[in-house]
Amino acid sequence: MVIGVPKEIYPGENRVAMVPDVAGKLIKKGFDVLIENDAGLNAGFTNQDYEKVGVKVLSDLQELYSKSDIILKVQRPIEHPQYGKNELELMKSGSLLITFMYSLHYPELAKKAAELGINVISMDAIPRTTLAQPMDALSSQANIAGYKAVILAANHLHKIFPLMMTAAGTISPAKVVIMGAGVAGLQALGTAKRLGAVVWVSDIRPAVKEEVQSLGGKFIEVETDESMQDEGGYAKEASPEFLKKQQELIAKHVAEADIVITTALVPGKRAPLLITEEMVKSMRPGSVVLDMAVEFGGNVEISEKGKTVKKYGVTIIGETNLPSLVPYHSSEMYARNLFNLVNYASKDGKFNHNMEDEIIGKSTIVKDGQVVHERTKELLK
C-alpha cells in the first residue's frame, strides 16, 4: 500500500505528519511512502532527509493523492488555495485519511468525506486505554503545548520566575495558576516548577490532586459530590452550580497570580468559561493570561482567537496552535503516534481497517460511505 503525506496548508501550521526516521520504519514494514515537495521544511526536515530513507518526493500534489491509499495529515482538510477545492476532493475514493478531524466540532467534514467515499480515522478519537497509549496523539501534542505555554507566558511576563537572593535584596518567586490538570496542565506545572515558580493548579476532577502534588504543585480543591470524569478518562461538562463555586474560589488565586494558564477542554463541547473579565481586571498590571482553549470558544471571557492583546494592563495570549511553535519535536511525536497506529493495524504493508477492533473501530469516523462514529452521527441529525 502507498502512504502519502501532503504539505499542511492550514494557516500557521508548521508541523508535518511524517518525519524521515519514522518514514523509514514504514518502508521497512512494506509500505511505499510519498511526500509532497518541502512538506517537512517548516518543521526542520529537508527533501534530502526523506529521500535518504527511501521516501519519494513529489512536486505534483494531485499525483500524490491519486497514488496514495492512505493519506497522513496533521490538520483537518480545508480548501486548497491552489486547486479551489477541499483536500478531501483531491483524494481518491476508497482511500483512508488519518488526521485530527475533530468531527465533534466539524461534523459537516465527516459528512463530506462519506459522500466522497473517503474513509476517515481521527487521531482525536483514539480511546484512552493502555493498549492505545502509544497512539495517543492528543496527549503527545498536549505535552508539547503545556511546555510551550509556560515559555510563551514567561516571555511576556515582566518578572523572572525563580526566588533569587542577591546582594541587592531578595526577589520573590512568580506565582503561576494553571486551570486544568490534564496532560497539558501537568506539563505546564512541571515546566513552571523547573523555572522556579510557585504553582497552583485547579481541576474539576478531585482524583488528580495527588498527581499535582507529586509534581510540586498546590491543588485548588472545589468540594463536590458530582462525578467529574467520563469513562474514557476525559473531563465531563460541569454543572452551572459547580462552575460558580469554582469561579469564586479561583478568583482569589487569579488576583494574586503573575501568570494564569487555562487548559480546560470538554470533547465536542464549547470550552468552559473559567476566567471572567472581572477576574482579569483584578490582576496586577504586567500579569499574563494564556488561553489554551481559545480555538474551541476559550476559557477566558476576553481572550481573542489567534491574537495576543493587552487589556486592563494584562497581556492575554490566544495562541491556537502551540505545538506548531515547536514543530520539530511535535512532528516527531505525532509521526510516532501515526506509526504505532498504522503498524498496529497492518501486516506485510497492508492496512486492515477492522471495525471490530477496539482501537480502530472507536477512532473511525467514516467507513464505506457512512458516518459510523456515533456522537458525530448524532450531531448530523
Image (tube, grey):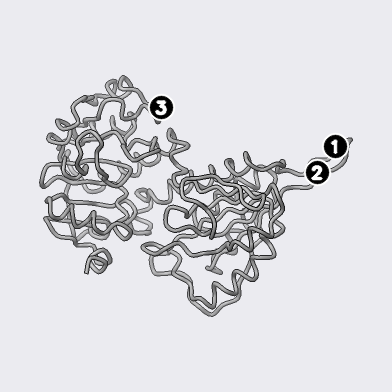
Q: Which residue is mark 1?
A: 166
Q: Could you tell me how far apart the alpha carbons at marks 3 and 1 are, in whole angstroms?
A: 41 Å
Q: Which residue is mark 2?
A: 171
Horizontal arrangement in the rendering, residue 199 relative to residue 76 (left or right): right
Q: Amino acid at mark 1?
A: Thr
Q: Secondary structure at mark 3?
A: loop
State which quadrant residue 132 falls in: bottom left
Q: Secondary structure at mark 1?
A: strand
**Number of other residues with Cα within 10 Å of mark 3, as a class: few under 14, some 14 to 19, many 20 or more:** some
Q: Which residue is mark 3?
A: 44
Contact between marks 3 and 1 (CB within 8 A): the answer is no
**Number of other residues with Cα within 10 Å of mark 2, as a class: few under 14, some 14 to 19, many 20 or more:** some
Name the residue nearer the viewer: 368 or 256: 256
Of the 4 image quadrants, the one containing the C terminus is bottom left
Of callouts 2 and 1, the N-terminal one: 1
| Image position of 246 with respect to 83: above or below | below
Name the residue nearer the viewer: 309 or 129: 309
Contact between marks 2 and 1 (CB within 8 A): the answer is yes
State which quadrant residue 9 falls in: top left
Of callouts 2 and 3, the N-terminal one: 3
x then y, percent, for residue 120: 21, 51
What residue sits 67% from the left and 49% below the top? 313
